Image (tube, helix red, strand yellow):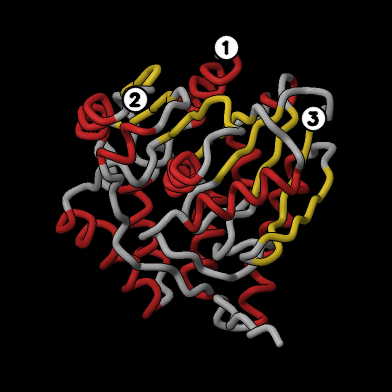
Amino acid sequence: MEKSVKSLFKSAQGKQEVLSLYDQKLEELNIDFEYIQVETSFGITNIIATGDTSLPPIIFIHGSNGCAPIALETYPNLSKRFRVYAVDVIAQPNKSAETRPSMKDDAYGKWMNEVIDQLNITGVTLAGFSFGGLVILKTLENDESKIKEVFLSAPAYIVNGNPLKALFKIFIPMRRYMRSGKPKFVEAFLRELFTNRDEFGIKYLSKVFMHFKMDFTPVPIIDKEKAKLIKTPITLIAAKHDVMFPGEKMIKRATQIFPSLKESVLLKNSKHVQSSQDNRFIENLILEA
Protein backbone atom coordinates (compact mmCIF):
# COMPACT_ATOMS: atom_id res chain seq x y z
CA MET A 1 0.00 0.00 0.00
CA GLU A 2 1.39 3.38 -1.04
CA LYS A 3 2.19 5.84 1.71
CA SER A 4 -0.01 8.91 1.33
CA VAL A 5 1.78 12.24 0.92
CA LYS A 6 0.86 14.84 3.51
CA SER A 7 -0.42 18.00 1.84
CA LEU A 8 1.89 21.00 1.69
CA PHE A 9 -1.15 23.24 1.90
CA LYS A 10 -2.14 24.15 5.46
CA SER A 11 -5.85 23.64 4.76
CA ALA A 12 -8.24 22.56 2.00
CA GLN A 13 -9.73 26.08 2.03
CA GLY A 14 -6.27 27.65 1.62
CA LYS A 15 -5.48 25.33 -1.28
CA GLN A 16 -8.74 26.30 -2.96
CA GLU A 17 -7.94 30.02 -2.57
CA VAL A 18 -4.51 29.60 -4.20
CA LEU A 19 -5.77 27.40 -7.05
CA SER A 20 -8.63 29.79 -7.69
CA LEU A 21 -6.03 32.48 -8.48
CA TYR A 22 -4.18 29.94 -10.65
CA ASP A 23 -7.37 29.41 -12.70
CA GLN A 24 -8.00 33.16 -12.84
CA LYS A 25 -4.55 33.83 -14.30
CA LEU A 26 -4.91 31.03 -16.85
CA GLU A 27 -8.27 32.42 -17.98
CA GLU A 28 -6.84 35.94 -18.27
CA LEU A 29 -4.18 34.67 -20.70
CA ASN A 30 -6.96 33.95 -23.19
CA ILE A 31 -5.00 31.25 -25.04
CA ASP A 32 -5.80 27.90 -26.61
CA PHE A 33 -4.29 25.26 -24.36
CA GLU A 34 -4.63 21.71 -23.15
CA TYR A 35 -3.98 20.18 -19.77
CA ILE A 36 -1.64 17.20 -19.82
CA GLN A 37 -1.01 15.10 -16.75
CA VAL A 38 1.86 12.62 -16.66
CA GLU A 39 2.75 10.05 -14.04
CA THR A 40 6.26 10.10 -12.57
CA SER A 41 7.88 8.28 -9.66
CA PHE A 42 7.33 11.52 -7.69
CA GLY A 43 3.60 11.60 -8.48
CA ILE A 44 1.38 13.32 -11.02
CA THR A 45 2.84 16.30 -12.88
CA ASN A 46 0.45 18.84 -14.37
CA ILE A 47 1.40 20.59 -17.61
CA ILE A 48 -0.27 23.31 -19.66
CA ALA A 49 0.56 22.88 -23.34
CA THR A 50 0.03 25.39 -26.12
CA GLY A 51 1.26 25.93 -29.68
CA ASP A 52 1.21 23.61 -32.68
CA THR A 53 2.25 20.03 -31.93
CA SER A 54 4.45 19.98 -35.05
CA LEU A 55 6.70 22.76 -33.69
CA PRO A 56 9.92 22.05 -31.73
CA PRO A 57 9.35 21.54 -27.98
CA ILE A 58 10.19 24.01 -25.24
CA ILE A 59 9.53 23.46 -21.53
CA PHE A 60 9.01 26.43 -19.18
CA ILE A 61 9.94 25.89 -15.55
CA HIS A 62 8.65 28.52 -13.12
CA GLY A 63 10.32 29.77 -9.97
CA SER A 64 9.75 28.95 -6.31
CA ASN A 65 6.17 29.46 -5.10
CA GLY A 66 5.03 29.80 -8.70
CA CYS A 67 2.86 28.02 -11.23
CA ALA A 68 2.57 27.30 -14.96
CA PRO A 69 0.17 30.16 -15.89
CA ILE A 70 2.68 32.72 -14.53
CA ALA A 71 5.43 31.17 -16.71
CA LEU A 72 3.16 31.30 -19.78
CA GLU A 73 2.42 34.97 -19.15
CA THR A 74 6.14 35.76 -18.90
CA TYR A 75 6.96 34.65 -22.48
CA PRO A 76 3.65 34.85 -24.40
CA ASN A 77 5.03 34.79 -27.95
CA LEU A 78 7.05 31.60 -27.89
CA SER A 79 4.06 29.48 -28.89
CA LYS A 80 4.37 30.98 -32.39
CA ARG A 81 7.65 29.12 -32.86
CA PHE A 82 7.48 26.30 -30.30
CA ARG A 83 5.18 23.67 -28.89
CA VAL A 84 5.18 25.06 -25.35
CA TYR A 85 4.91 22.92 -22.22
CA ALA A 86 4.55 24.98 -19.03
CA VAL A 87 5.15 22.60 -16.13
CA ASP A 88 3.73 22.89 -12.64
CA VAL A 89 6.83 22.06 -10.59
CA ILE A 90 6.11 19.40 -7.95
CA ALA A 91 5.98 20.49 -4.30
CA GLN A 92 4.95 24.02 -5.26
CA PRO A 93 1.57 25.78 -4.83
CA ASN A 94 -0.03 24.49 -8.03
CA LYS A 95 -1.74 21.40 -9.50
CA SER A 96 1.14 18.91 -9.45
CA ALA A 97 1.98 16.32 -6.77
CA GLU A 98 3.03 17.58 -3.36
CA THR A 99 6.03 15.23 -3.03
CA ARG A 100 9.09 17.32 -2.12
CA PRO A 101 12.37 16.04 -3.64
CA SER A 102 15.73 16.84 -2.09
CA MET A 103 17.83 19.67 -3.53
CA LYS A 104 20.98 17.88 -2.37
CA ASP A 105 20.93 15.22 -5.11
CA ASP A 106 19.66 15.10 -8.69
CA ALA A 107 16.06 14.17 -7.74
CA TYR A 108 14.60 17.26 -9.45
CA GLY A 109 16.55 16.33 -12.58
CA LYS A 110 15.30 12.76 -12.46
CA TRP A 111 11.75 14.08 -12.14
CA MET A 112 12.10 16.42 -15.14
CA ASN A 113 13.63 13.70 -17.31
CA GLU A 114 10.72 11.43 -16.40
CA VAL A 115 8.34 14.21 -17.52
CA ILE A 116 10.23 14.54 -20.82
CA ASP A 117 10.09 10.76 -21.33
CA GLN A 118 6.35 10.69 -20.63
CA LEU A 119 5.79 13.53 -23.12
CA ASN A 120 7.81 11.47 -25.64
CA ILE A 121 9.82 14.47 -26.87
CA THR A 122 13.48 15.01 -27.75
CA GLY A 123 15.58 17.99 -28.84
CA VAL A 124 13.98 19.93 -26.00
CA THR A 125 14.75 23.55 -25.15
CA LEU A 126 14.45 24.29 -21.42
CA ALA A 127 13.75 27.81 -20.12
CA GLY A 128 13.56 28.50 -16.41
CA PHE A 129 13.48 31.34 -13.91
CA SER A 130 15.00 31.32 -10.39
CA PHE A 131 14.30 27.90 -8.81
CA GLY A 132 13.45 26.72 -12.33
CA GLY A 133 17.12 27.24 -13.14
CA LEU A 134 18.10 24.79 -10.40
CA VAL A 135 15.66 22.24 -11.85
CA ILE A 136 17.19 22.70 -15.31
CA LEU A 137 20.79 22.30 -14.13
CA LYS A 138 19.79 19.21 -12.11
CA THR A 139 18.18 17.85 -15.29
CA LEU A 140 21.45 18.30 -17.20
CA GLU A 141 23.35 16.62 -14.37
CA ASN A 142 20.95 13.67 -14.40
CA ASP A 143 20.71 13.13 -18.19
CA GLU A 144 21.15 15.82 -20.83
CA SER A 145 20.71 13.53 -23.86
CA LYS A 146 17.26 14.87 -24.82
CA ILE A 147 18.05 18.55 -24.20
CA LYS A 148 18.98 20.80 -27.11
CA GLU A 149 19.83 23.96 -25.15
CA VAL A 150 18.82 25.87 -22.02
CA PHE A 151 18.01 29.43 -21.00
CA LEU A 152 18.47 30.35 -17.33
CA SER A 153 16.98 33.61 -15.99
CA ALA A 154 18.26 34.72 -12.56
CA PRO A 155 18.75 31.04 -11.74
CA ALA A 156 19.27 29.44 -8.37
CA TYR A 157 22.12 26.95 -7.91
CA ILE A 158 25.07 28.91 -9.37
CA VAL A 159 25.73 31.47 -6.60
CA ASN A 160 23.93 32.72 -3.50
CA GLY A 161 23.65 36.27 -2.25
CA ASN A 162 24.62 37.70 1.12
CA PRO A 163 22.62 35.63 3.65
CA LEU A 164 22.27 38.51 6.13
CA LYS A 165 20.93 40.82 3.46
CA ALA A 166 18.42 38.15 2.35
CA LEU A 167 17.43 37.55 5.98
CA PHE A 168 16.65 41.17 6.78
CA LYS A 169 15.25 42.26 3.42
CA ILE A 170 13.24 39.17 2.52
CA PHE A 171 12.80 36.44 5.11
CA ILE A 172 12.08 38.54 8.21
CA PRO A 173 9.38 40.64 6.44
CA MET A 174 7.97 37.38 5.01
CA ARG A 175 7.76 35.80 8.48
CA ARG A 176 6.21 38.97 9.89
CA TYR A 177 3.54 38.84 7.21
CA MET A 178 2.87 35.15 7.90
CA ARG A 179 2.36 35.96 11.59
CA SER A 180 0.38 39.18 11.23
CA GLY A 181 -1.29 39.03 7.78
CA LYS A 182 -0.44 42.73 7.35
CA PRO A 183 -0.02 43.61 3.64
CA LYS A 184 2.76 46.14 4.38
CA PHE A 185 5.15 43.25 5.11
CA VAL A 186 4.39 41.56 1.77
CA GLU A 187 4.92 44.88 0.03
CA ALA A 188 8.26 45.34 1.84
CA PHE A 189 9.97 42.16 0.70
CA LEU A 190 8.41 42.10 -2.77
CA ARG A 191 9.89 45.56 -3.37
CA GLU A 192 13.29 43.90 -2.86
CA LEU A 193 12.52 41.10 -5.32
CA PHE A 194 10.38 42.64 -8.08
CA THR A 195 11.82 45.15 -10.55
CA ASN A 196 8.31 46.49 -11.21
CA ARG A 197 5.21 46.19 -9.05
CA ASP A 198 3.09 43.19 -10.03
CA GLU A 199 -0.47 43.26 -8.69
CA PHE A 200 -1.21 39.62 -9.46
CA GLY A 201 2.15 38.55 -8.03
CA ILE A 202 1.36 40.34 -4.78
CA LYS A 203 -2.12 38.79 -4.60
CA TYR A 204 -0.91 35.27 -5.42
CA LEU A 205 2.11 35.28 -3.12
CA SER A 206 0.05 36.77 -0.27
CA LYS A 207 -2.16 33.67 -0.43
CA VAL A 208 0.79 31.30 -0.85
CA PHE A 209 2.68 32.66 2.15
CA MET A 210 -0.40 32.27 4.35
CA HIS A 211 -1.59 28.87 3.13
CA PHE A 212 1.42 26.89 1.84
CA LYS A 213 4.28 25.21 3.71
CA MET A 214 7.30 26.63 1.91
CA ASP A 215 10.70 24.99 1.72
CA PHE A 216 13.22 27.11 3.64
CA THR A 217 16.10 24.71 3.00
CA PRO A 218 19.23 26.68 1.99
CA VAL A 219 19.68 26.57 -1.79
CA PRO A 220 22.86 24.64 -2.70
CA ILE A 221 25.27 25.68 -5.44
CA ILE A 222 26.48 23.44 -8.23
CA ASP A 223 29.79 21.66 -7.80
CA LYS A 224 32.31 22.89 -10.38
CA GLU A 225 33.23 19.32 -11.34
CA LYS A 226 29.59 18.57 -12.19
CA ALA A 227 29.31 21.86 -14.08
CA LYS A 228 32.34 20.93 -16.21
CA LEU A 229 30.62 17.74 -17.37
CA ILE A 230 27.63 19.59 -18.87
CA LYS A 231 27.77 19.78 -22.67
CA THR A 232 24.40 21.40 -23.42
CA PRO A 233 24.63 25.06 -24.60
CA ILE A 234 23.68 27.44 -21.78
CA THR A 235 22.44 31.01 -22.13
CA LEU A 236 22.54 32.79 -18.79
CA ILE A 237 20.57 35.94 -17.99
CA ALA A 238 21.58 37.47 -14.65
CA ALA A 239 20.20 40.52 -12.81
CA LYS A 240 22.55 43.14 -11.41
CA HIS A 241 20.35 44.07 -8.42
CA ASP A 242 19.32 40.53 -7.51
CA VAL A 243 19.50 40.12 -3.71
CA MET A 244 19.02 36.35 -3.95
CA PHE A 245 21.48 35.48 -6.72
CA PRO A 246 23.66 38.54 -7.54
CA GLY A 247 24.18 38.95 -11.28
CA GLU A 248 27.82 39.99 -11.54
CA LYS A 249 28.93 37.31 -9.08
CA MET A 250 26.87 34.75 -11.01
CA ILE A 251 28.33 35.56 -14.42
CA LYS A 252 31.85 35.49 -13.02
CA ARG A 253 31.40 31.99 -11.55
CA ALA A 254 29.43 30.66 -14.53
CA THR A 255 32.22 31.76 -16.89
CA GLN A 256 34.72 29.83 -14.77
CA ILE A 257 32.77 26.58 -14.35
CA PHE A 258 30.58 26.00 -17.45
CA PRO A 259 32.51 25.03 -20.61
CA SER A 260 29.19 25.00 -22.50
CA LEU A 261 28.25 28.59 -21.57
CA LYS A 262 27.15 30.01 -24.92
CA GLU A 263 26.22 33.52 -23.79
CA SER A 264 25.79 35.51 -20.59
CA VAL A 265 23.83 38.73 -20.23
CA LEU A 266 23.66 41.09 -17.26
CA LEU A 267 20.37 42.98 -16.91
CA LYS A 268 21.68 46.22 -15.44
CA ASN A 269 18.38 47.60 -14.13
CA SER A 270 16.83 44.37 -12.92
CA LYS A 271 16.08 42.95 -9.49
CA HIS A 272 15.40 39.21 -9.06
CA VAL A 273 12.03 39.25 -10.87
CA GLN A 274 12.51 40.86 -14.26
CA SER A 275 10.41 43.67 -15.73
CA SER A 276 8.10 42.96 -18.69
CA GLN A 277 10.61 44.82 -20.88
CA ASP A 278 13.44 42.49 -19.81
CA ASN A 279 11.15 39.49 -20.29
CA ARG A 280 10.59 40.56 -23.92
CA PHE A 281 14.37 40.76 -24.32
CA ILE A 282 14.78 37.22 -22.93
CA GLU A 283 11.92 35.98 -25.13
CA ASN A 284 13.70 37.38 -28.20
CA LEU A 285 16.95 35.67 -27.17
CA ILE A 286 15.08 32.36 -27.19
CA LEU A 287 13.30 33.08 -30.49
CA GLU A 288 16.55 34.05 -32.22
CA ALA A 289 18.62 31.13 -30.89
Horizontal relation, residue 34 to residue 138: left or right: right
Up the image or down, 176 lies above or below 40; here it is below
- According to the image, label 1 marks what residue? 288
Horizontal relation, residue 17 to residue 144: left or right: right
**SS state under label 3:** loop
Dot 1 or dot 2, earlier in sequence: 2
Which residue is rendered at x = 59% and y = 49% of the image?
Answer: 112
Dot 2 or dot 3, earlier in sequence: 3
Nearest-to-viewer mark from 1 and 2 = 1
Up the image or down, 13 lies above or below 124; here it is below
Q: Residue furthest bottom?
A: 1
Which x, y percent locates residue 258? 31, 28
Amino acid type for the residue under numbered disc 1: Glu
Between 26 and 56, which is closer to the camera in this rendering? 56
- According to the image, label 2 marks what residue? 267
Amino acid type for the residue under numbered disc 2: Leu
- Numbered mark located on residue 17 in the image: none
State the quadrant of the N terminus.
bottom right
State the quadrant of the C terminus.
top right
- According to the image, label 3 marks what residue? 51
**SS state under label 2:** strand
Q: Is residue 126 visible?
A: yes
**SS state under label 1:** helix
Q: How many marks?
A: 3
